[in-house]
Image: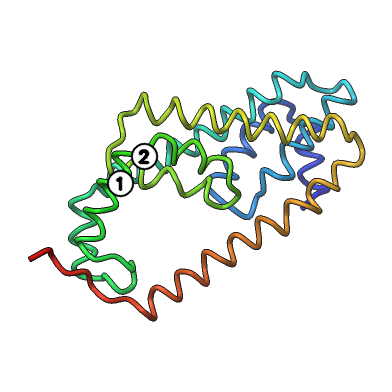
Amino acid sequence: MLDALTAWVGEGGYFAVAFLMFLENVVPPIPSEVIMPLAGYAASRGDLSLPLAILAGSAGSLAGAWLWYGIGRWIGAERLERGAARYGRWLTLSPLDVRRAIGWFDRFGGATVLVGRLVPAVRTLISVPAGIVRMPTGRFLLFSTIGTLIWTSVLAGLGYLLGGQYEAIEGWLDPVSKGIVAMLVLGYLWRVATFRPGREPG
């Protein structure tokens, strides 16, 4: 995969960076931990401008986040509550859990989106609950943009500084990403096994 991504970035320039970062949000096996350091490496060789590469990567990533946000808005809180009432065990949610989560997200949603955009694996998923609770579009884009710019700038900057050693970034971040995914999967399976529908307060 690394050789293919290197060729894409080299031949497609900023469009390739933006498109790959969009796909990274839609098809998680394509890792931003490889794409943006590659863009930074290309900038260190003079093939790209580092600021423009960061902007291109951020634009593609935000487009993917916007797609998931739209899916979340389409699902909506009412539909999610009905789904929780019917498929609660597999969603690991009861209707009461949904209402509590919405209240929590209404209160802390902005910070949650910003931090979520900085966490591997989570950064792709965080847009869905933001859409479900119908976080104001401007607020969602503001916090998503801040988090995304930080993430892409750090990765591209490391690729720029390390030059041909950018593989070291993948070697460090890839296990972290896989570890987070593994924890999410194990956490889900645990919740399914121990799920008990929440009760309405009496």
Q: Along the horizontal axis of the image, is 48 left or right of 95?
A: right
Residue 113 higher or lower than 89, as above or below: above
The residue tagged with tag 2: helix, strand or loop? helix
Instruction: Identify the image quadrant of the C terminus.
Output: bottom left
Whole-percent x, y for residue 24 in the image: 60, 45
Provide the residue designation for mark 1.
104
The 10 Å Cα crowd at callout 1, few under 14, some 14 to 19, many 20 or more, is few
Q: Quadrant of residue 139?
A: top left
Provide the residue designation for mark 2.
108
Whole-percent x, y for residue 99 in the image: 21, 53
Query: Does the residue at mark 1 contact the one at mark 2 (Cβ under 8 Å)?
Result: yes
Residue 166, label in figure = none
Whole-percent x, y for residue 76 in the image: 24, 47
Tell me the kind of residue under disc 1.
Trp
What's the residue at 84%, 32% (across, down)?
41
What's the residue at 20%, 70% (across, down)?
86
